[in-house]
């Protein structure tokens, strides 16, 4: 018995007709948004975020720090977390309030300051401070982001 399969022209055409259409990125995003809307943010979800923000596992705290719905007081606590990964998630979160982002400009971790440098919602005064950061990596990220802004 052979493993080779020979399709007729009609079968090949039927397979082409049944193939899924390829969506653009924008079409796929719109389809996802309309087909699978995000659940409402409820008091229960906020309570869960508060509980998880105090979890012993830093990866759990990172997930809270990445949430667009974490309350400001939770973000303040996570910005002072002992784990640099958690602080980095706060630094790159686009919904982190500006005052909290300002507090991270002098973070001891180069990684946290680097994430802060690439966050498009960081206030201009923080970017000026990061332009003179002791780390060449952070300064180069500031230049890269500046070049992107100029290219637009």
Image (cartoon, rainbow, N blue to C red):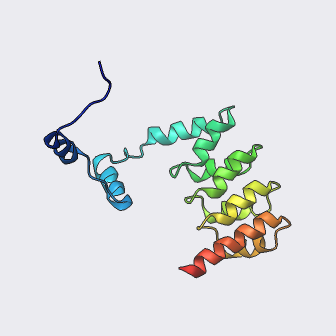
Q: Residue at x 30, y 53 (%)?
A: 31
Residue that extends furthest to the front in the rendered view of this protein: 1
Q: Residue furthest top?
A: 1
- Which is more toward the observer, 115 or 144? 144
Going 65% across and 76% down the picture, which residue do you hit? Answer: 146
Estimate the x, y position of residue 59 in percent, counting from the top left: 65, 37
In the rendered image, the vertical position of residue 152 relative to residue 80, given as above or below: below
Q: Quadrant of the N terminus?
A: top left
User: Considering only vertical position in the picture, is 29 above or below 6?
Assistant: below
Residue visible at 45% across and 42% down in the picture? 43
Q: How many marks?
A: 0
Q: Spot the residue most to the left.
A: 10
Q: Is residue 96 left or right of residue 129?
A: left
Which one is in front, 39 or 24? 24
Location of residue 97 (image quadrant): bottom right
Left/right of residue 47 with respect to residue 126 in the rendered view: left
* In the image: residue 109, left or right of residue 22: right
In the rendered image, residue 73, in percent from the top left (x then y), is placed at 62, 50
Foreground residue among 21 and 134:
21
- Measured from the top left, where is residue 132 in percent x and y? 82, 73
x%, y% of residue 56? Answer: 69, 31
Residue furthest toward the right?
134
Which residue is at 32% across, 59% downward? Answer: 27
């Amino acid at each position: 018995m052979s493993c080779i399969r020979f399709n007729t022209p009609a079968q090949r055409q039927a397979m082409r007709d049944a193939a899924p259409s390829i969506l653009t990125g924008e079409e796929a995003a719109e389809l996802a948004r309309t087909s699978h809307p995000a659940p409402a943010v409820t008091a229960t979800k906020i309570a869960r975020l508060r509980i998880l923000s105090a979890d012993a596992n830093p990866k759990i705290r990172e997930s809270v720090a990445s949430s667009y719905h974490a309350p400001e007081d939770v973000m303040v606590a996570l910005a002072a977390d002992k784990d640099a990964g958690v602080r980095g998630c706060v630094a790159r979160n686009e919904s982190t309030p500006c005052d909290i982002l300002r507090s991270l400009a002098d973070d001891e971790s180069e990684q946290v300051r680097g994430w802060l440098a690439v966050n498009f919602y960081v206030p201009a005064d923080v970017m000026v401070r990061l332009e003179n950061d002791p780390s060449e990596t952070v300064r180069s990220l500031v230049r890269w982001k500046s070049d992107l802004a100029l290219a637009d």
